[in-house]
């Protein structure tokens, strides 16, 4: 047995700090993964007329949480697995278990990659900009990621939920939300984007 093999065959003690961080990372990964799965399943059922906005728009938020979930899983496994594998004294068995663990990790990452692609495609379908009036009223403008002239408008329904108030509109030129202003009127809001003047009705 070589010196390297002798060193590898010695059990590697896992510190409490390493164990704690590893378990925490795995738990965070699991919780975020479940949350993203539930939200991504719920969002299409709600339909395109609703928008979740919690710091970031819905699909962008789901995509970011999915990335963090994957990074946390990799971190947790990197902290926990090496000391556990080194506790196996037989070299051939340790290598076999390591290969099986790698294969299981690759197989487990495939659903994550599928979700990564799906969430990414949903995220690039549109960008969102908030426009506020002097009185404090606000709207969210959804700008299509595929038709640069198309946009729609959402009004706030509750703290983190917005409802579509104006369906898809087509600007005469490439739409730029930075050129939009919002004015409050007696019965509704008036959104002005370049030459477009779009009444934004209140929600029923």
Image (cartoon, grey):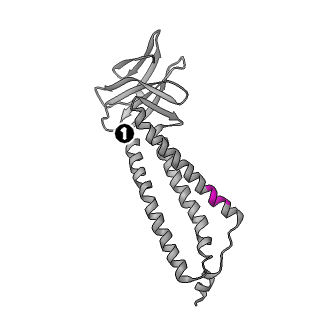
The quadrant of the image that shows the C terminus is: top left
The quarter of the picture where residue 180 lies is: top left
Percent x, y of residue 59:
45, 40
Percent x, y of residue 129:
45, 31
Relative height, residue 138 to residue 7 (above, below):
above
Q: Which residue is mark 1?
A: 125
Q: Spot the residue most to the bottom.
A: 1
Magenta segment boundaries in residue numbering: 20-24
Q: Residue at x 53, y 52 (%)?
A: 69
Relative height, residue 85 to residue 39 (above, below):
below
The quadrant of the image that shows the N terminus is: bottom right
Percent x, y of residue 99:
48, 73
Magenta stretch: residue 49 in it?
A: no
Question: Left or right: 96 with respect to 9?
Answer: left
What secondary structure prevails in the magenta region? helix
- Toward the viewer: 77 or 172? 77
Percent x, y of residue 45:
41, 35
Magenta stretch: residue 22 in it?
A: yes
């Amino acid at each position: 047995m070589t010196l390297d093999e002798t060193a590898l065959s010695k059990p590697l003690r896992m510190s409490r700090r390493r164990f704690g961080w590893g378990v925490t990372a795995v738990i965070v990964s699991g919780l975020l993964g479940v949350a993203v799965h539930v939200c991504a399943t719920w969002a299409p059922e709600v339909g395109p007329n609703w928008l979740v906005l919690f710091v970031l728009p819905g699909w962008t938020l789901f995509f970011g949480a999915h990335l963090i979930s994957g990074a946390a899983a990799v971190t947790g496994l990197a902290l926990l697995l090496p000391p556990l594998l080194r506790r196996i004294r037989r070299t051939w068995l340790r290598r076999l278990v390591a290969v099986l663990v790698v294969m299981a990790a690759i197989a487990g990452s495939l659903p994550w990659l599928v979700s990564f692609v799906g969430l990414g495609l949903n995220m690039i379908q549109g960008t969102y900009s908030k426009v506020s009036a002097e009185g404090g009223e606000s709207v969210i403008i959804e700008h299509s990621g595929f038709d640069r002239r198309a946009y729609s408008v959402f009004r706030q329904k509750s703290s983190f939920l917005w409802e579509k108030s104006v369906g898809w509109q087509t600007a005469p030129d490439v739409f730029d939300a930075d050129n939009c202003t919002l004015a409050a009127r007696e019965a509704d809001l008036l959104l002005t984007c370049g030459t477009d003047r779009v009444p934004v009705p209140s929600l029923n």
